[in-house]
């Protein structure tokens, strides 16, 4: 197990190094300057700004300074948020993105599992067709279309929820529904397929032949094996929800990391772009690691060492 985690950590650090290097050189290769949008900057002030952020140094020295700061967990100062570090921007915005992501993940898992079980237990019946129809819609319709539809229906026409902002608990309803619709639909289809495969397995037939009750068979034998594919999907899904809520945050006017990421690109805030890219990468890697751990907990037969290689 320790060798497995050691190898995973090594790969994570190597991936972050490659990503940080690629992001740095891509930002430097972008034509123009992060200060070019400023109007009528005197040459002396422009020179001072370049010196403040190290743009007057040779490229190799800028790169070494940047990687040295990253090694010390210093993401630098934002170029557009005055006197604000990139870390402070992330801490401020991630609070809203994390809340939105956690609620969306919980709803997606709960709704997806319930719909998938209902469809599998009513195979080739009306409930099966109806739930899979909803699932196909969820997979097919982009989340920004769902978001605008929810705003129009529940915010503008019926005036049940606010259209923008997160000022009260009910304000989470619409963005959470919009963000969780697609993953819930995917989990429903995945659960249905997995459940049908498990229910047709020989050990389930043997359990029925022994006279075990249907509830015992479902909970003790079928459920754990049926959710294994879902567990594999949940880790990347959680990371994608938290890091991929950029459009939803923009539509609902939520001041999360998605809004900061979009503004950093339009403002050419190099340090913030690179810091958010690395932060998102860390979340994705941790989600993948959490998936491996959850897989081992759900199915004790799966050995972490075995998945990572010998050891």
Image (spheres, rainbow, N blue to C red):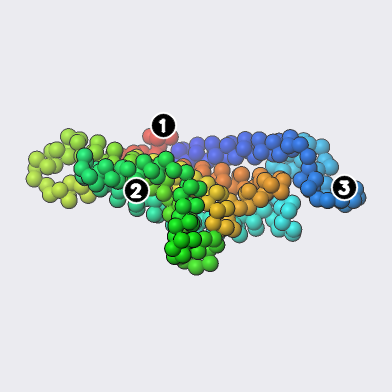
Q: Is residue 109 above or below residue 32?
A: below
Look at the numbered disc 3 and give the secondary structure of its residue. Answer: helix
Look at the numbered disc 1 and give the secondary structure of its residue. Answer: loop
Q: Nearer the viewer, mark 3 or mark 2?
A: 2
* Residue 8 picture location, percent across and down: 50, 39
Comparing 79 with 114, the one in front is 114
Comparing 227 with 169, the one in front is 169
Total labels drawn: 3
* Residue 259 picture location, percent across and down: 61, 53
Q: Is residue 102 above or below residue 64?
A: below
Answer yes or no: is residue 300 visible. Answer: no
Q: Which residue is labeled 1 in the image?
A: 310
Q: Which of marks 1 and 2 is nearer the N terminus?
A: 2
Q: Residue at x 57, y 58 (%)?
A: 253
Q: Residues within 10 Å of mark 2 (few under 14, many from 20)?
A: many
Q: Which residue is labeled 3 in the image?
A: 47
Answer yes or no: is residue 156 visible. Answer: yes
Q: Residue at x 9, y 42 (%)?
A: 210
Q: Which of marks 3 and 1 is nearer the N terminus?
A: 3
Q: Which of marks 3 and 2 is nearer the N terminus?
A: 3
Q: Which residue is labeled 2 in the image?
A: 112
Q: Residues within 10 Å of mark 1 (few under 14, many from 20)?
A: few
Q: Would you say 147 lies left or right of 133 here?
A: right
């Amino acid at each position: 197990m320790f060798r497995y985690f050691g190898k995973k950590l090594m790969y994570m650090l190597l991936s972050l190094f490659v990503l940080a290097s690629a992001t740095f050189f891509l930002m430097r290769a972008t034509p123009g300057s992060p200060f070019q949008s400023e109007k009528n900057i005197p040459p002396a002030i422009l020179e001072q700004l370049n010196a403040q952020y190290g743009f007057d140094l040779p490229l190799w020295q800028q790169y070494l300074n940047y990687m040295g700061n990253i090694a010390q967990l210093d993401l630098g100062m934002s170029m557009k948020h005055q006197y604000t570090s990139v870390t402070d921007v992330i801490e401020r915005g991630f609070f809203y993105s994390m809340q939105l992501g956690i609620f969306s993940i919980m709803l997606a898992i709960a709704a997806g599992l319930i719909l998938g079980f209902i469809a599998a237990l009513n195979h080739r019946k009306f409930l099966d067709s109806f739930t899979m129809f909803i699932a196909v819609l969820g997979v097919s319709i982009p989340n920004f279309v769902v978001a605008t539809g929810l705003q129009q229906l529940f915010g503008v026409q019926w005036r049940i929820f606010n259209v923008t902002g997160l000022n009260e608990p009910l304000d989470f309803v619409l963005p959470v529904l919009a963000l969780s619709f697609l993953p819930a639909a995917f989990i429903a289809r995945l659960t249905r397929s997995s459940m049908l495969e498990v229910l047709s397995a020989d050990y389930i037939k043997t359990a029925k032949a022994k006279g075990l009750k249907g509830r015992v068979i479902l909970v003790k034998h079928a459920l754990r094996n049926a959710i294994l594919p879902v567990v594999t999907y949940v880790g990347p899904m959680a990371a994608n929800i938290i890091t991929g809520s950029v459009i939803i945050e923009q539509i609902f006017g939520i001041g999360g990391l998605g809004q900061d990421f979009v503004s950093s690109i339009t403002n050419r805030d190099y340090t913030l772009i690179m810091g958010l890219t690395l932060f998102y990468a860390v979340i994705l890697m941790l989600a993948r690691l959490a998936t491996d751990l959850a897989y081992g907990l759900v199915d004790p037969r799966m050995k972490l060492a075995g998945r990572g290689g010998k050891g």
